[in-house]
Amino acid sequence: MIETEDVPVTDLSEVDGVPPDLDMRDVASALGAQEMRLGLWYFEPGEEIQYHAHAEQEEVYYALEGEFSLKLGRSGEEEYIEVGPGTFWIARPKIGHGHRYVGDDRGVVLAIGAPPVSDPGIDPHSMEVSEEYGMDEDE
């Protein structure tokens, strides 16, 4: 068990190769979780997590504070949806997703992902091309 304030805040702008440049609390690591990722993401007005996908990880998000504009769906089939506090959304493997904070104060999102992958996300547009031609993402 751990209190939120006991989980250190990481400024991702100081971590090479890990977009986006947001603050977050890695709750999963603080709890010793091994089969999932769990974090609190903090947004200032205009900050965003760019449209991306994961080959294997499924993610569930929950807006705790603030208003967000979501971009969800496969490449070429994206939908834009406005959400506020109390809203859940899901990003399945190989499906593009991203969100921008459109509120005036700080926004907070709880993010849960499994299995825990180390990739920071892949371009959903290139994933669609790779799948269409039967290639792995690494080719």
Image (cartoon, rainbow, N blue to C red):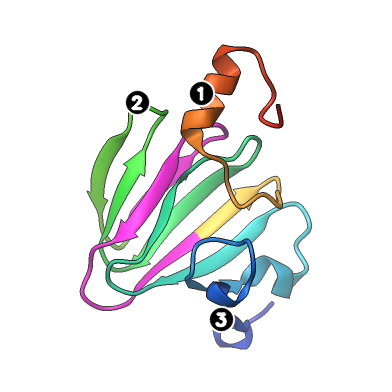
| 92 to the left or right of 99 | right
Whole-percent x, y for residue 70 in the image: 32, 48
Whole-percent x, y for residue 94 in the image: 55, 31
Label 1, label 3: how far apart the Cα atoms are:
38 Å
- Above or below: residue 82 compared with residue 107: above
Q: Nearer the viewer, mark 3 or mark 2?
A: 2
Label 1, label 2: how far apart the Cα atoms are:
10 Å
Residue contact at pointers 1 and 3, CB within 8 angstroms:
no
- Residue span colored magenta: 87-110
Label 3, label 2: how far apart the Cα atoms are:
38 Å
Whole-percent x, y for residue 12 in the image: 56, 72
Q: Amino acid at mark 1?
A: Glu
> Residue 128 shows which numbered tag?
1
Whole-percent x, y for residue 66 in the image: 28, 68
Report which residue position mark 3 lands on: 4
| 34 to the left or right of 127 | right
At 22% across and 68% down in the image, what residue appears?
Answer: 103
